[in-house]
Image: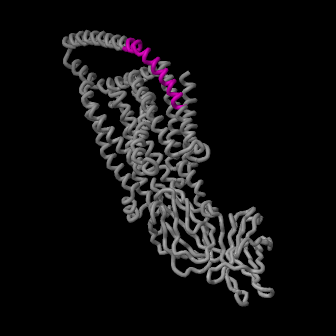
Amino acid sequence: MTQTIAPRLRTLVLLLLAAACALLAGAGPASAHAALTGSDPREGAVVDEAPAQVSLTFSESVSMDDDSLRVLDPRGERVDDGKPSGTGGATYSVKLHAGLPDGTYTVTYQVVSADSHPVAGAYTFSVGAPSETSVAVSGQSAGGGFVGGLYGVGRYVSYTGFAVLVGGAAFVLACWPRGSGVRVLQRVVVSGWLALTAATLLLLLLRGSYTGSGRFADVFDLNLLGEVLQTKPGAALVSRLLLLAAAALFIAVLFGAYDKREDEEKRDLTFGLAVGGSVVAAGLAATWAMSEHASVGLQAGLAMPVDVVHLIAVATWLGGLTALLVALYRGPADTPVPALAVRRFSRVAFGSVIALVVTGTYQSWRQLGSWTAFTDTRYGQLLLVKIGLVAVLVGVAHFSRRWTAQLAEAAPAVAGAAAARRAEKRAGKASTKASGNAKVAQKTSSTTKGSGTTKGTGTAKGSGGSPRAAQLARQRAAVDAARQKRQRDADPNRFGLRRSVLAEAGIAVVLLVVTTVLTQTEPGRTEEEAKAAGGSSAAASAPSTGAVTLDMPFDTGAQNGKGVVRVELDPARVGANDMHLYVERPDGTAFDLPEVKVALTQKAKSIGPLPVAPDHITTGHWSASGVQIPMAGDWEVAVTVRTSDIDQVTISKNTQIG
């Protein structure tokens, strides 16, 4: 049965690992954690005069450099002064060159949100009338490409290394102190330290390119690395490296001086190691909490320590599970994992789950903000997957607790049988030794009677038999170890525990991947706030006012034939619109005209002219409701004004209809 079920479980774990890799590969670039909620000019706006500056408003504070906010003319040349500045809150602006000609201008931005993730985007506005532009605004993204993929892998490895390092050390200290001398457990903890250290160095080198150009060559730019060290994420990574140096000292003591002490002496040292290890673990967890989601948004002062507790609980549970799995499968046969150690870990894991539920509930409320965000946002959907995986993991852990209880009940009988085998073995050795001594005495007596040559020959044979005896001893030891391993694995309770722990570990791999992807996904609360504000592009193309305003001067050539017609189209979208016309003299006073007519034309699709006959409302004001615009695009708005029986003129401007 053992040989049949174990391969199936290994296949299941491999399938879960493949699913985890697919999730990690499909995560894509980091989603924007700071959303563009407003801009001035807004996207698609047509303004009469060139603005003095362009302003962007984000959902949270961001970091900018001289190239973070750029404004390009239709030929793709920069028309900004390259020095963005904050104007209060999360609004940032950049000044424009004076005297910009009419045409379509492109605004591009690439910033770093307060929770360390890059954000990029672009939109257009027009001065006077829309025009063709050589600047492409599609495909604006940040944190993607080869560098972004490497950065995502580095994040996953760092979380995994942290869990294995902290959880493995906690398993040894809290559950199985004698395990400090087990070589496979030492390798597990050291491997976690090496993985976390290597991943931290990789993230530090990739950081500048990840948030900037995305080019792999920039990874080796020392100037860029120096800029990274001055940022909050860079300082967090450097702090993590310093704490890993302290963790290396902790590991050396745990598997060195601690392992060599007797059980009573270990109790005295356990408390000191537990305190020191907890401080180092909390410091490592804080390097994530102080630079990512928990450091921004609601109640940051409370969210950061909650995040530290959450990360340590995850590491204690999943890392301890890894250590237990390795000890069960790869541990030496003469030092099996005792039932008491498994029961202790079961209690530690239960406490970790309680901490995860409490801290996770708070984090979910803070990051989502509403029940609908569970299903309407990607963050909420991933969180539902994570909750489901935790529930399954707790269910499998229940079976592990049952096997642990049965193992503990069988432990006295197994211990008694083992003691009997050891006593029988000692008795056999004593009998063999006595028989050997008798033979040696007899041989010595006969040798004494014989010649010296015979004695010399016996000496030669004795010296030649020593390597052979050592080889036989090694073979006997190997056979004994294999026999002990078979006896250990034949225990149905221990075999059942190994199966359930292996299943737990497979689910934990996928859970860790989902958690990593969550840290790179825009929180549901931020996403919903961006949607409420219209999003980065929708807020610009369809603001709350929804109106497009066109000012068109006219001159019919007659006396009192000069003025300005202002056309307001609301909401400037496909379908029904409200149109208002205001006529003013050059001095700004309203006056009436004998006739005003409007026509809408889209020349690119050969649509129109579509006539509009507005109704006179009051002096200088005409209005028309239900004006139908059949499709989006660049529309020409032509207004015909007549100031006398024979004096009239037609003026026009183009506008973008969304």
Q: Quadrant of the C terminus?
A: bottom right
The answer to whether residue 626 is above or below residue 564 is above
Q: Which quadrant of the structure image shows residue 653?
A: bottom right
Closer to us: 357 or 200: 357
Q: Position of residue 93 (x, y in %)?
A: 49, 68
Q: Which quadrant of the structure image shows residue 558?
A: bottom right
Q: Position of residue 554 (x, y in %)?
A: 69, 83
Q: Does any portion of residue 472 appear in the rendered image? A: yes
| Residue 591 shown left or right of residue 414 in the figure | right
Which residue is situated farthest in the front direction here? Answer: 618
Residue at image coords 75%, 62%: 576
The answer to whether residue 636 is above or below residue 389 is below
Q: Position of residue 378 (x, y in %)?
A: 58, 47
Q: Does any portion of residue 333 appear in the rendered image? A: no
Residue at image coords 59%, 54%: 532
Does residue 350 belong to the magenta stretch?
no
Q: Position of residue 298 (x, y in %)?
A: 46, 48
Q: Main secondary structure of the magenta part?
A: helix
Q: Which quadrant of the structure image shows residue 575?
A: bottom right
Residue at image coords 42%, 40%: 311
